[in-house]
Amino acid sequence: MKKRICLLAGFDKKNILQDYVLYLARKLSKLSDVYYLADGNISQKELKKIEPYTKYAASVLHKSYDFGSWQILINHVGWEKITTYDEMIICNDSIYGPISNMQDIFDYMDLRDYDFWGLTENYNSNYHLDSYFMVFKNDVLRHPKFHEFWNNIIPNTNRKTYESILTPFLTELGFTGNSYIKNYKKEDQLAYPMRLFRTNRMPFIRINSLKEPEHNLKEPILYIDSRIENKTGYDSDLINNHLKSDASFHGFGLKYYAKKSARTVKNKISDWL
């Protein structure tokens, strides 16, 4: 088995370590040495929840989004140690899962011998791999220009800026990268969580696809909670408990559908009056 390090970036506006994040860290720890950093002020008492699954867990208010957290973790661990690993994973907590066997995906991608890879690909602004989960092989980890990329992360930069430039940056250095799931239609792949799971055993569901389904979900919302649990075995309470912590959220699946319908009727009545 390859030796991997995983840099896990987190954020919670209430500075709470949600159960779905603990589950994510536990599963990632089966594949790698996990180092966790949250952008915020999570207490030491709260951080102890994730310590059993990590080599390091901390919280720093830096307001530089995921790439800022990954930069700080890289500086903490140091390139000398990082380059002893076969692969480095960067991951954030904007996803639920894993809902499938991650080792199978690593085995599949190892056969393709890419220098770096991600789970999905994105055509917004330019072609790039989505950064919520990316993997870099040792040749990339040892390249001085890759080190420079991380040294040059600037605080408060738009969170999508570095994601969109990382893939072309590595490609220009001569590295070969690709995605686990191809995006031939150049669509928002993560808007189809159940289709991706059914066709590709996609291991993650984007949180915003369930949190803001009007904008980020292209599949039927009705009964999606039971479909997730029945088809994947993932505990839907991990999703529900997290989403309920947001006062603006009304639940997903049947609960969401019912409340959305009630709001629609109420708005129509108001218009009539």
Image: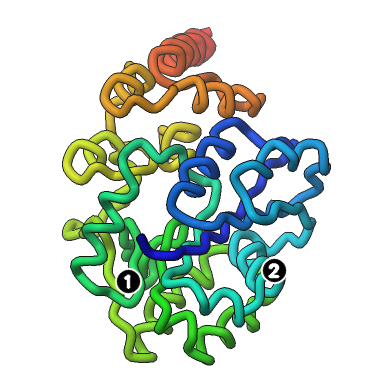
Contact (Cβ within 8 Å) of mark 1 with mark 2: no
Q: Residue at x 26, y 54 (%)?
A: 187
> What secondary structure is found at the residue carrying circle 2?
helix
Residue 4, given in percent of the width and then of the height, sits at 46, 63
- Residue 193 drawn at (x, y percent): 31, 38
The residue that mark 1 highlights is 127
Residue 27 lies, with reference to residue 38, above or below; the image says above
Residue drawn at point x = 64 percent, y = 82 percent? 151
Colour scheme of this structure image?
rainbow
Is residue 82 in sight in this rendering?
yes
- Counting from the top left corner in percent of width and height, residue 247 is at 66, 24
At label 1, counting other C-alpha atoms closer than 10 Å, the crowd grade (few under 14, some 14-19, many 20 or more) is: some
Label 2, residues with CA under 10 Å away: few <14, some 14-19, many ≥20: many
**1 or 2: tag closer to the N-terminus:** 2
Of helix, strand and loop, which one carries label 1?
loop
Query: Which is more toward the observer, 21 or 94?
Result: 21
Picture layout, residue 266 above or below residue 43: above
* Distance of label 1 from label 2 (alpha carbons): 26 Å
The N terminus is located in which quarter? Answer: bottom left
Q: Return the residue at label 2.
A: 72
For image coordinates 43% across by 69% down, the residue present is 87
66 lies left or right of 135: right
Of 232 and 87, which appears nearest the observer?
A: 87
